[in-house]
Image (cartoon, rainbow, N blue to C red):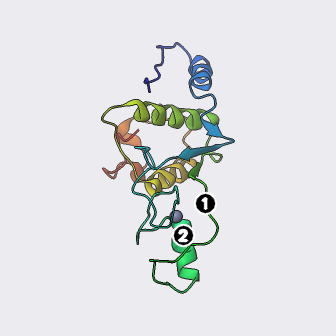
């Protein structure tokens, strides 16, 4: 994959327009679909059959972990896990369009990078929730020193 590139632009409207073009077709509605091989949101495969979601602990994805707990914690070997799941998604619908497109563009760049930064799915979801709650209108607005504390924890800074 070739990394997408942005031209230097004069105005926010031009940037938004260009981001719309560069990220077209990358979202399913307002959700980002994550594969296991994605540096941003991917990870080791869930232990259940052909589950396409990354583990979130106990060798299971969050949905299979919840099902496993509800089933009374059966022995994993031989446990079917219920009906099959689709790939993991991250709902970006609570973000302003600008942030949604900026994040998507950053993820496309990471996917094309031979040595990409990585971020686990649960951290990506926490980042998205935090951005929505903080009311960030663009990733370009706050300087690094004024970002909300949750993003300066040394784990997510510079990841995208
Ligand atoms: Zn799973």
The residue sitting at 45% across, 36% down in the picture is 142
Name the residue: 43% across, 30% down.
Answer: 109
- Asked whether disc 1 touches disc 2, contact meaning CB atoms under 8 Å apart, the reply is yes
User: In x, y percent, where is residue 151?
Assistant: 40, 49
Residue 156 versus residue 6 in the image, above or below: below
Q: Which residue is mark 2?
A: 64
Residue 141 visible, this angle:
no
Left or right: 139 as drawn, with respect to 153: right
116 displayed left or right of 94: left
Q: Find out if the beta carbon at label 2 lies less than 8 Å from the nearest ligand 1 atom.
A: yes
Residue behind label 1 places its C-beta within 8 angstroms of ligand 1: yes
Tag on residue 85? 1
When the figure is inspected, residue 95 is found, relative to residue 86, above or below; the finding is: above
The residue that appears at 61% across and 60% down in the rendered structure is 85
| Residue density around tag 2, few if under 14, some if 14–19, many if 20 or more, within 10 Å | many
Residue 42 point in image, percent of width and height: 44, 50
Give 125 or 109, whichever is nearer the viewer.
109
């Amino acid at each position: 994959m070739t990394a997408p590139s942005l031209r230097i632009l004069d105005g926010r409207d031009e940037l938004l327009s260009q981001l719309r073009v560069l990220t077209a077709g990358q979202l399913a509605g307002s959700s980002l679909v994550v594969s296991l091989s994605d540096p941003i949101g991917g990870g080791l495969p869930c232990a259940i059959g052909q589950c396409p979601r990354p583990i979130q602990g106990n060798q299971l994805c969050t949905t299979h972990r919840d099902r496993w707990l509800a089933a009374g914690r059966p022995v994993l070997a031989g446990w079917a896990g219920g009906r099959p799941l689709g790939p993991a998604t991250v709902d970006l619908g609570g973000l302003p369009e600008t942030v949604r497109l900026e994040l998507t563009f950053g993820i496309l760049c990471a996917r094309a990078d031979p040595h990409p930064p990585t971020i686990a799915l649960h951290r990506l979801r926490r980042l998205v929730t935090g951005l929505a709650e903080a009311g960030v209108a663009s990733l370009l607005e706050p300087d690094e020193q004024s970002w909300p504390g949750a993003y300066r924890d040394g784990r997510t800074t510079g990841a995208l």
